[in-house]
Amino acid sequence: QVQLLESGGDLVQPGGSLRLSCAASGIIFSLSNMVWYRQAPGKQRELGAGISSGGRTNYADSVKGRFTISRDNAKNTVYLQMNSLKPEDTAVYYCNAKRVSRSSIDVYWGQGTQVTVSS
C-alpha cells in the first residue's frame, strides 16, 4: 500500500520559515519524481516545486529564490524548505509522487498539510 505522509504545516508570520516533509512508503522512492503542489482557498491546485529522480529541480515563478526542494533517498523523504513566507503562500500543500515505466504511469498523492501565513 502506497502512503505519502506530509508533515510540517503550521501557522507562521510573514517573513518566517517552515520546512515540510513528505515520507513515502510502498513505492520505489529513488525512481520517483516528487512534486509539492499547493491549493489556496478558492483556487486551483498548482505546482510549487518538483525534483526528479535524478535530482533536477524546478520551481513555480512565485516561489523561486524562497523555496528549496530536496530529497533523501535513504529516508524515502522529500522536503520543502520555505523561507520569506508571504500571506499568498497560504494553502494546503500536497506531496505527489510519479513514476514512469515502460508499462505504466503511477501517480500518488498525500493527504495534504496546511500552511497559513498570517500576522
Image (tube, grey):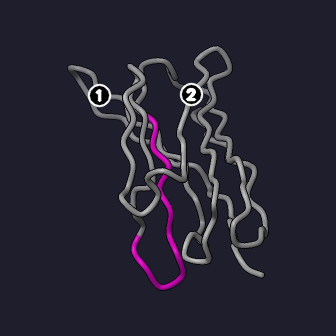
In which quadrant of the rendered view does residue 48 lie? bottom left
Q: Using the image as rendered, state which of residue 17 and residue 28 is in the foreground.
A: 17
Q: Using the image as rendered, state which of residue 19 and residue 114 is in the foreground.
A: 19
Left or right of 59, for residue 79: right
Residue at image location 42% in from the left, 24% down from the top: 55
**Looking at the picture, does residue 4 appear above or below residue 12?**
above
In which quadrant of the rendered view does residue 2 lie? top right
First in sequence, mark 2 or 1: give its number.
2
Specify the amino acid type for callout 2. Answer: Arg
Q: Pointer 2: residues within 10 angstroms few (<14), some, or many (20+)?
A: many
* Residue beneath disc 1: 100
Report helix, strand or loop for mark 2: strand
**Looking at the picture, does residue 87 appear above or below residue 37?**
below
**Marking on residue 54:** none
**Looking at the picture, does residue 33 appear above or below residue 62?**
above
Q: Using the image as rendered, state which of residue 106 and residue 23 is in the foreground.
A: 23
Residue 18, percent across and down?
72, 53
Left or right of 28, for residue 46: left
Residue 106, percent across and down?
36, 35
In which quadrant of the rendered view does residue 35 lie? top left
Residue at image location 64% in from the left, 40% down from the top: 22
Report helix, strand or loop for mark 1: strand
For marks 2 and 1, give the CA distance. Answer: 18 Å
Residue at image location 67% in from the left, 59% down from the top: 113
The quadrant the N terminus occupies is top right
Residue 56, percent across and down?
37, 28
* Residue beneath disc 2: 71
Which span of residues is magenta-colored?
34-44
